[in-house]
Every structure is written in C-alpha cells, then in structure tokens.
Image (cartoon, grey):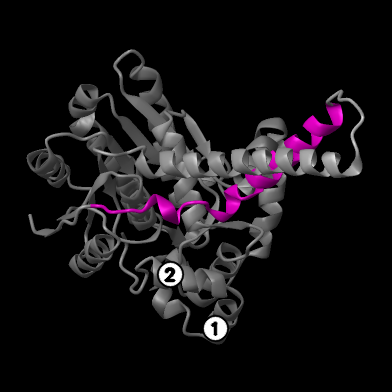
C-alpha cells in the first residue's frame, strides 16, 4: 500500500483567536453591564460620578466578553491535543476541511484517498498549516485495504481517538437512467466502507474511549429526486450509525451521526451526471452554491468537530437540513408530495443516456451559466483541492 508521509509539529498561536462569530460576546458583556447599572440601588450621584460608574461597568462587561471569546477559542484550539484522528475521503472537500479543523484543534491526522495526486496535495497543504499529517492510499470498498489503513495508523501513532467516515460518491440523474452498478457502487462506498472501517477500529476506540463520526446527509432522511443511489446508500449509513450508537452504550465508544445539507465544497465538479449530463449539472451546481441553501465548508467542519469532541449523538449542520427533517417528521405525506413536484421540474431521461463527470458536463452553455452564478462554490473548490473529477 503506497504511503505519502509528511509530518510537522502543529504550532497555532492563541493570539489569532477572537473569531468574528464570537465578537458579539463583547456586546453581550456590555449589555449586561448596562443592565447591572440600571438595576443597582445607589445613592444619588452627580452626572460625573454616574458617567464614571457606567464607564467602569461597561469596561468590566467588555473584558468579560473578550475573555469569554478568547477562552472559547483557546479551548477550541486545544480540545484534540494529543489525539489521533483518521479521516476517510480526507483528500478534498469536506474531508479535507475536517482534517484542517482537527489539526487546528491539536490532533494528529491520518487521511486516506484513492488518488495519489490528491493525497499528495492534501498532505502537503496540511503540513503547510502546521498539522501533523499522514496520508495513506486506501479504497474503503476494499476490506483488506481498510484493515491495512487502521494498522498503518496504529503503527505510526499507537492510538486512534476519532474516526470520521466521510468518503462518498454522488451520482445524479433520473432513476431510469441508473443501472444496478450505480447502486452497488454507492452502497460499497457509503455503507460497506463505514461498516468495515468501524469494525476494524472498534477495539482501538474502546481502548482510547474514542468516537466514530459518520457523515450522512439530509438525503438519508429526505431523499430528493435524481439522487436515488446516493439516498439509498445514505439511508443505510444513517441506520448503521444510529444502530452503532445504540450498540456501543457502556463501552466508552461514542458515535456521532452528522446530517449535513448542501455545503459549498466545490464537489459538483466531481459528481457523476447521468442521462442528460449538461442539464443535470446546471441545476445541481446552481443549488449547491446558493448562499441561503448551502453553508460554508469551514463553518460546517467547525460545528462537526465541536459536536463530535463533546460527544454529541447528532449534529445537524445546516438550518435547511434541520427544517427538512422537521417537515418530514411532522408531515411526511406533504413532504413527499413536494418532492414529487420537484421531480417533475428536473430533466427527463433522454432516449440516449450519457454519463459524464462534472468537469466535462460543465463545458456547455448551461454549465457555464450555472458556474457564473455559483461563484462561491467554485472558489470553495479551489480552496478544497477540487481540481479534478475523480471520486474521493
């Protein structure tokens, strides 16, 4: 099994800290100080004394807010210190961003993939960020390669604290355009892959009281049209994840089921489009990059790592995914009717079925138009090693 190895000691300054989303804590602290001043029963003071009092309380509140922000970021940057994380499909897209986030949290990471060029670029990029990274060529559909992957990780680091089952493949087209091989491939990657990885690593996770993180999808609970092989495989993976969570009670092993919605990872260029590839590419690339429906990959990875590190059983990443799950739970018939309407709006299967990767399907007038609108997603692809169309 080919190995690409680059290791650098992580070195992250706490001074980088106060992230934009935590700056509002300063305002919360100041608001608390103002409320405190208004509620205090104090003797009458002159305007000058009152102003000084208010300034003192406001300063104290601001310090509380800043301190909370810094402490929160400090904890985030060190929550995985000394631990080892193994990520399948970690060479690009969400898997690569998860490797970056885990590395920034202090973890040593092992990533695997099937393409040597992607693997080399990913490991090199992680090393440049100060992440202690190791890359292994591995196809998760091959049980022997999975066992070798786990053995390689144990030989190198002596422990495994977190396993992220992220490897996936997306095939898009009308159901009549798919044949049995498409369903078999989807199941091999997204069900049997996590199954073999979880079994191979379970004893090691018992020793470390570690965590299995399964990246499922909103498609596991609410399958949209033209994604039937993907939806079937993700349904199976979600059942595996929830079943493992029930079975591992009392063993010290935690299982986190992650339910993302659309994320801006640039993955549309690596999708397989079947039927009328150019039209299928256009609608998928457009929806996958819309800001209101999709989420930034960095934000998604941060939420996933934080939830898994705290041992949460479920992490629903996007508001759209949460709404979709709620609607399906409350009104499954109505939700299904909505999916039927959406299916009628998508391209029909042509008489002559064609199959193309995203890098080919985008080279049409419709594809270029969709790319012009989905600028954020294309930029995300450049940042996340999405330069070719091979599956992760």
The reply to whether the magenta stretch includes residue 210 is no
Assign a secondary structure to mark 2.
Answer: helix
| Residue on which disc 2 sits | 381
Quadrant in the picture for residue 293: bottom right
| Residue on which disc 1 sits | 368
Residue 301 - label: none
- Which of the two residues, 166 or 189, is positioned nearer the viewer here? 166
- Write down the region rendered in magenta: 10-39
Secondary structure mostly seen in the magenta stretch: helix
Q: Where is 370 relative to 304, above or below?
A: below
Question: x and y percent of residue 40 in the render?
Answer: 83, 25
The reply to whether the magenta stretch includes residue 28 is yes
**Residue at image point 50% right, 50% down:** 300
**Residue at image point 59% right, 82% down:** 369
Assign a secondary structure to mark 1.
Answer: helix
Density class for disc 1 (Cα within 10 Å; few <14, some 14-19, many ≥20) is some
- Calculate the distance from the C-alpha at mark 1 to the C-alpha at mark 2: 16 Å
Asked if residue 61 lies left or right of residue 275, the reply is right
Q: Where is 199 relative to 50, above or below?
A: above
Question: x and y percent of residue 366 in the render?
Answer: 58, 81
Asked if residue 208 lies left or right of residue 59, the reply is left
Visible residue check, residue 130:
yes
**Residue at image point 37% right, 56% down:** 169
Q: Where is 380 relative to 152, above or below?
A: below
**Residue at image point 46% right, 75% down:** 352
Q: How many marks?
A: 2
Q: Split into 4 quadrants, where in the image is the C terminus? A: bottom left
- Which of the two residues, 307 or 327, is positioned nearer the viewer here? 307
- Which of the two residues, 98 or 344, is positioned nearer the viewer here? 98
């Amino acid at each position: 099994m080919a190995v690409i190895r680059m290791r650098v000691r992580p070195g992250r300054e706490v001074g980088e800290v106060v992230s934009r989303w935590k700056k509002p804590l300063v305002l919360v602290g100041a608001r608390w100080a103002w409320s405190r001043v208004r509620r205090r029963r104090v003797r009458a003071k002159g305007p000058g004394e009152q102003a000084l009092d208010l300034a003192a309380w406001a300063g104290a509140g601001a310090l509380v807010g800043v301190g909370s922000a810094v402490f929160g970021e400090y904890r985030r940057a060190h929550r995985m210190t000394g631990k080892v994380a193994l990520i399948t499909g970690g060479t690009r897209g969400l898997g690569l961003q998860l490797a970056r986030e885990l590395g920034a949290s202090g973890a040593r990471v092992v990533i695997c993939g099937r393409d040597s060029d992607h693997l080399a670029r990913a490991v090199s990029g992680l090393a440049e960020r100060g992440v202690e990274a190791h890359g292994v060529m591995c196809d998760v559909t091959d049980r022997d390669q999975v066992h070798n992957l786990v053995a390689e990780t144990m030989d190198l680091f002596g422990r495994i604290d977190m396993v992220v089952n992220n490897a996936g493949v997306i095939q898009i087209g009308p159901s009549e355009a798919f044949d049995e091989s498409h369903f078999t491939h989807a199941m091999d990657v997204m069900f049997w892959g996590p199954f073999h990885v979880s079994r191979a690593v379970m004893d090691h996770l018992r020793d470390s009281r570690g965590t299995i993180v399964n990246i499922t999808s909103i498609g596991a609970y609410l399958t949209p049209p033209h994604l039937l092989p993907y939806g079937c495989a993700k349904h199976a993976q979600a059942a595996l994840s929830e079943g493992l969570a029930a079975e591992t009670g009392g063993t010290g092993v935690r299982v986190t089921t992650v339910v993302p919605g659309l994320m801006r990872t640039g993955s549309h260029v690596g999708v397989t489009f079947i039927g009328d590839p150019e039209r299928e590419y256009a609608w998928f690339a457009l929806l996958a990059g819309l800001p209101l429906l999709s989420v930034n990959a960095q934000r998604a990875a941060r939420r996933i790592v934080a939830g898994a590190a705290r041992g949460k059983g479920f992490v629903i990443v996007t508001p759209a995914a949460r709404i979709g799950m709620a609607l399906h739970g409350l009104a499954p018939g109505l939700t299904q009717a909505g999916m039927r309407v959406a299916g009628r709006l998508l391209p029909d299967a042509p008489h002559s079925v064609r199959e193309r990767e995203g890098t080919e399907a985008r080279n049409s007038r419709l594809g270029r138009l969709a790319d012009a609108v989905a600028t954020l997603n294309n930029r995300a692809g450049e940042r996340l090693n999405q330069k070719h169309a091979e599956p992760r």
